[in-house]
């Protein structure tokens, strides 16, 4: 939780103006999508190896090693003279996410079933430190301009990841057979087996887990499609000033963290399905406000988006943990991350083409339609463990 508190601040600090920073280094809207697409593509294939390794050799070593790796990678972003260096940095970040299945598995291992909703809420609630991130980003922008401010931001991020790596060295391994050694050669050697096991494991989990994957994976395709373009659309189309964008980010984070704990508790009491369905409806309504929004509409959009995120970020992993036996969690999470990333890679590539060559509104309209469909399919096909 200490790591998440520092890590969330670090993540959202440069994220505030990321797209504008890459644009200022010479990238078009299409190349912005291409950069993130390449990172997501690399990330996808590392998730399978990471899931296999997390179940075979344990969680801790991957998590700690990749954390220190990120500290070095972010220095590339801090010194990038052109967008090509950002591309290299993003690909390396994609590689570092080999630890993601281990991280999600160790969290699921650590939470009792009847407290998972509240537990996931608490682990995210400590990320309330990210409320400060847009404040610092806005301060750096006003005092050092966009490019220099972002370079300072990335230097801060590098220091944060190094500090969290030191904290994570105290992490307790949750698998009794956790290994004390890590070998890149072993990862490569066993990669085909890792892929096979991450696919065949679906025969061993309940059918509702497969339904959960099939319903929400398509919606994430369209969420990923839009993510890099909110700030560009707001700045170029809606004429929202850069510093006011930072204020909107602060508002979003504040609403998100205030709603987390109550929503997490309600999920434990009333179940996971209704919040999943409501989150899709909130996202659809928010996008409708965003497309041609006044400043008031944008504040409403971010409020709906924050509450929707609080619902899905607690209900989805809670239901996923409910439906997945502990010994398969690394592989299941590796495969779901793989699918999300490989589709996300295609989505980011497609979104750049749509945004630049058809209309900036096109990716957002598609997301609105898909979110409405996701709410309907959640109602029809998603079952909770007690409903089986």
Image (tube, rainbow, N blue to C red):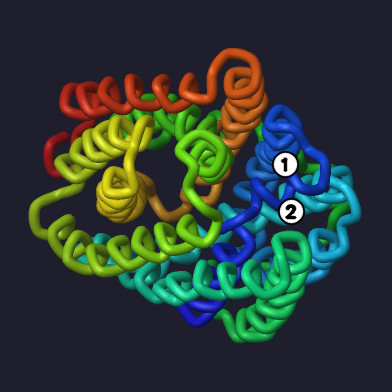
Q: Secondary structure at mark 2?
A: helix
Q: Residue at x 69, y 70 (%)?
A: 153
Q: Residue furthest top?
A: 358
Q: Residue at x 25, y 60 (%)?
A: 117
Q: Relative to residue 316, is residue 107 drawn left or right?
A: right
Q: Residue at x 33, y 64 (%)?
A: 120
- Of 89 and 269, nearer the camera is 89
When the figure is inspected, residue 6 is found, relative to residue 244, above or below; the finding is below
The earlier-in-sequence mark between 1 and 2 is 1
Q: CA distance from mark 1 to mark 2?
A: 7 Å
When the figure is inspected, residue 74 is found, relative to residue 271, above or below; the finding is below
**Quadrant position of residue 129:** bottom left
Disc number placed over residue 93 in the picture, else none: 2
- Of 237 and 164, nearer the camera is 237
- Residue 111 drawn at (x, y percent): 34, 68
Q: Secondary structure at mark 1?
A: helix
- Residue 152 drawn at (x, y percent): 74, 73
Q: Residue at x 65, y 52 (%)?
A: 18
Q: Quadrant of the C terminus?
A: top left
**Number of residues whose C-alpha sits closer than 10 Å to that of mark 2, classed few (under 14), some (14–19) or many (20 or more):** many
When the figure is inspected, residue 82 is found, relative to residue 168, above or below; the finding is above
Q: Name the residue that disc number 1 marks.
A: 39
- Residue 301 drawn at (x, y percent): 30, 45
- Residue 83 drawn at (x, y percent): 83, 45
């Amino acid at each position: 939780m200490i790591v998440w508190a520092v890590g969330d601040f670090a993540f959202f600090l440069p994220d505030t103006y990321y797209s504008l920073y890459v644009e200022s280094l010479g990238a078009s809207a299409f190349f912005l999508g291409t950069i993130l697409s390449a990172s997501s593509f690399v990330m996808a294939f590392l998730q399978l190896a990471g899931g296999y390794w997390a179940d075979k050799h344990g969680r801790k070593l991957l998590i700690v090693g990749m954390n220190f790796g990120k500290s070095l990678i972010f220095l590339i972003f801090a010194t990038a003279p052109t967008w090509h260096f950002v591309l290299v940095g993003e690909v390396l970040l994609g590689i570092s996410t080999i630890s993601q299945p281990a991280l999600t598995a160790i969290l699921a291992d650590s939470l009792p079933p009847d407290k998972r909703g509240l537990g996931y809420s608490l682990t995210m609630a400590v990320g309330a430190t990210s409320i400060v991130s847009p404040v610092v980003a806005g301060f750096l922008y006003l005092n050092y301009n966009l490019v220099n401010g972002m370079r300072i931001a990335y230097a801060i991020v590098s220091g944060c990841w190094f500090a969290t790596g030191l904290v994570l060295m105290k992490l307790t391994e949750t698998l009794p057979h956790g290994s004390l050694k890590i070998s890149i050669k072993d990862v490569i050697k066993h990669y085909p087996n890792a892929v096979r096991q991450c696919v065949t494991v679906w025969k061993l989990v309940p059918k509702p887990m497969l339904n959960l994957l099939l319903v929400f994976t398509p919606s994430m395709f369209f969420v990923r499609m839009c993510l890099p373009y909110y700030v560009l659309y707001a700045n170029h189309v809606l004429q929202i000033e850069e510093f006011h964008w930072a204020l909107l980010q602060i508002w979003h984070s504040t609403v998100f963290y205030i709603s987390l704990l109550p929503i997490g508790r309600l999920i434990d009491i009333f179940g996971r399905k209704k919040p999943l369905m409501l989150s899709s409806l909130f996202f659809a309504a928010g996008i409708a406000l965003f497309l041609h929004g006044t400043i008031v509409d944008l504040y409403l959009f971010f409020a709906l988006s924050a509450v929707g995120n609080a619902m899905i970020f607690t209900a989805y992993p809670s239901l996923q943990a409910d439906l997945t036996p502990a010994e398969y969690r690394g592989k299941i999470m590796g495969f779901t991350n793989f699918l999300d990333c490989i589709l996300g890679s295609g989505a980011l590539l497609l979104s750049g083409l749509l945004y630049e060559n058809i209309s900036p509104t096109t990716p957002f309209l598609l997301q609105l339609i898909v979110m409405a469909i996701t709410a309907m399919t959640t109602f029809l096909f998603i079952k909770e463990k007690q409903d089986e």
